[in-house]
Image (cartoon, rainbow, N blue to C red):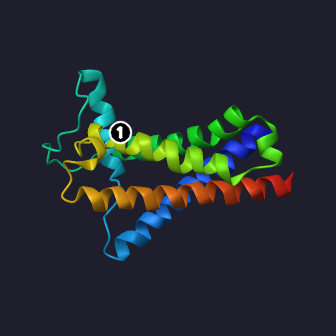
Amino acid sequence: MQTFLFIMVVGVGSTLALDLWGLIARKMGWLPGAHWPSVGRWLLGLPAGRFFFDGKNAAPNTTTESVLGWAFHYAVGLAYAAMLPLFWGADFIRDPGLGPCLVIGLGVSTVAGLGFFMPAMGGGLLARKTPSPPMTIAYVLVAHAVFALAQFALALGVAAAM
């Protein structure tokens, strides 16, 4: 039960922190961040063999695409939270460390984002097909640093509550 609670709080909470950072960044005029309904459209295209999102479908996103994209986003956040006790043991829940959160929340998520999701969504490997690859990479690094720090803060909170 402790593991489930840890994964839910850290996974949902750190993903929410990432989303709040995205809203702040957008309001500051930085990059707009991920468009989760488009991710839903990409996911729905996978069974038909469409492994790369081309963005050519100009139709408005459907509710199904939006729900699927957002659910996928939070499921990935839960998976990253689950990696912490999975890789560092159940003791991590009682005594979390910053290092593992940086490895998963910043390192693994950034590599997955720039090496898998960015190309899958049409942005190219390491964002090379975006209008400004260096700015996109900087945005991803900052956003995932926020995510990692939120993972750590929430993990500390869960440990203190137990």
Which structural element holds mark 1? helix
Left or right: residue 4 compared with residue 43? right
Q: Relative to 153, is 55 above or below?
A: above
Mark 1 belongs to which amino acid? Gly
- Examine the rendering and report whether any part of residue 94 can be seen: yes
- Examine the rendering and report whether any part of residue 64 can be seen: no
Q: Residue furthest bottom?
A: 28
- Residue 108: x and y in percent read 50, 41
For the point 76% across and 50% down, the residue is 96
For the point 36% across and 47% down, the residue is 66
* Residue under label 1: 115
- Residue 76: x and y in percent read 51, 40
Q: Residue furthest right?
A: 162
Left or right: residue 3 compared with residue 83? right
Q: Quadrant of residue 93?
A: top right
For the point 52% across and 40% down, the residue is 75
In this rendered view, identify the residue nearer to me: 20 or 71: 20
For the point 39% across and 44% down, the residue is 113
Q: Quadrant of residue 132?
A: bottom left
Q: Quadrant of the N terminus?
A: top right
- Residue 19: x and y in percent read 47, 60
Q: Relative to 28, is 144 above or below?
A: above
Q: Residues within 10 Å of mark 1 (few under 14, many from 20)?
A: some
